[in-house]
Image (cartoon, grey):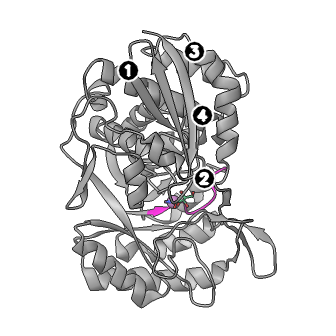
Amino acid sequence: MKITDAKVFVASPSRNLVTLKVFTDAGVNGLGDATLNGREQAVVAYLQEHLIPCLIGRDPFQTEDTWQYFYRGAYWRRGPVTMAAIAAIDVALWDIKAKALDLPLYQLLGGKSRDRVLVYCHANGTDLEEAVDDVGRHIEQGYRAVRVQSGIPGLEAAYGIAKDGRKYEPATEGLPQETVWSTEKYLRYLPKLLTRVRDVYGDAIALLHDVHHRLTPIEAARLGRELEPCHLFWLEDPVTAELQEGFRLIRKHTVTPLAVGEVFNSVYDCLTLITEQLIDYIRMTVVHGGGITPILKLAHLAEPYHVRTGFHGATDLSPITMAAALHVNTAINNFGIQEHMPHAALVDEVFPHEYSFRAGDMYIGEKPGLGVDYNEELASRYPYRRAYLPVARKPDGTMFDW
Ligand code: EZ4
Ligand code: CO
């Protein structure tokens, strides 16, 4: 079998999503997600100008060799643009291979290790009462694991908080939105919120919280310690993790489980974190981590260190990435949890998919390949619109992490 062509689609059915379709001489096609929120066109150019010309004529079954060709062969390694582009190709090739063999993809990754995949949802509110109520609404929908975010008293906007009754979507059109952050206000407030949620809903619910990279190691250590009575499932992205060694300090002070990695794109971003057991969950996922080929290796590397997976699953990752993640989650032993932020109905229409949600779990389905299609005609009615993630500053104007 040979690859004959590959096409990149950029569409905005409620938000920008970049999709790759790879064609073969056997008539089998494969799909890959190449979305990088706020930097979409860089990945499009990387694919069109640099990767696709080298892809034509290759054997789609050679997933390992093709991955190495684009990773090693570029000389310039890593980075989110490069790795999202390589991921799109890698996932599309796995999709082709599984379709050609008439098997659901998880069968090629180790087979079924579980029947269902536990997911967590996002509950949020502009203040404590609203956030607590929203947790209740999600429990009613069947979720058994809930991430809680809330507006912070004294701050106008905060990460993860929906406005005007709409679903939360951080990227906005126009230039980046400016927000103000105060570590002091956040640290004073957060233990009150999570203590209250635990009091109201009891012990059976798994509770998670995302710090979104905004603390220093010692601040994160303090927060982790204060949250210990809440028995969190995890505290996510407590610090910017470029300094992996920073986690040693956090770990020294708290037994609150830690998750990190949604912005990672290479195993080298988390090698110290994993091999020194500085984290409990690794969040690097298929699209930003370079595809199924490296994510499978990452999961296998993490297993003997008792680090489990908790893949990123926000709405800026398309249903193709969700399906790919679910196949990996189904096959590996050290699966932990999967993030689930439901896509807008229109996105689900553009990407008809086999996976489904029931009573707090996702089910991958048995269709050959990834089990996702792409409705090109429908997608073409929603052209790309430039959008950016917000930026954050401290109250005195100093540039900070959003
Ligand atoms: O802010 O994917 O845990 N989930 C997250 C996400 C990220 C977005 C950024 O594009 O932190 O909501
Ligand atoms: Co996050």
The local crowd at label 3, few if under 14, some if 14 to 19, many if 20 or more residues have their Cα within 10 Å, is some
The segment highlighted magenta reads 235-242
Camera-side residue of 230 and 117: 117
The secondary element bearing badge 2 is classed as: loop
Number of numbered discs visible in the structure rendering: 4
Eye-nearest disc, 4 or 1 = 1
Q: Is the magenta region chiefly helix, strand or loop? A: loop
Residue ID at (64%, 41%) = 80
Q: Do we see residue 322 in this rendering?
A: yes
Give the amino acid type for the residue marked by disc 4 in the picture.
Answer: Ala
- Please state if 363 lies on the left or on the right of 279 as rendered: left
Please give the label number shown on residue 348: none
Q: Position of residue 245 (x, y in %)?
A: 62, 50
What residue sits 42% from the left and 65% below the top?
Answer: 256
Q: 182 or 223, which is in the foreground?
A: 182
**Residue 266 in sight from this viewpoint:** no
Q: Which is nearer the N-term, disc 3 or disc 1? A: 1
Image spot of residue 204 (x, y percent): 22, 71
Q: What residue does disc 3 label?
A: 56
Q: Secondary structure at mark 1?
A: loop
Counting residues from the start of the chain, the first of labels 1 and 2 encountered is 1
Indicate which disc residue 28 carries: 1
The x and y percentages for residue 229 are 36, 76
* Relative to 61, 188 lies left or right: right
| Residue behind mark 2 | 37
**Disc 4/disc 1 C-alpha distance (Å):** 21 Å
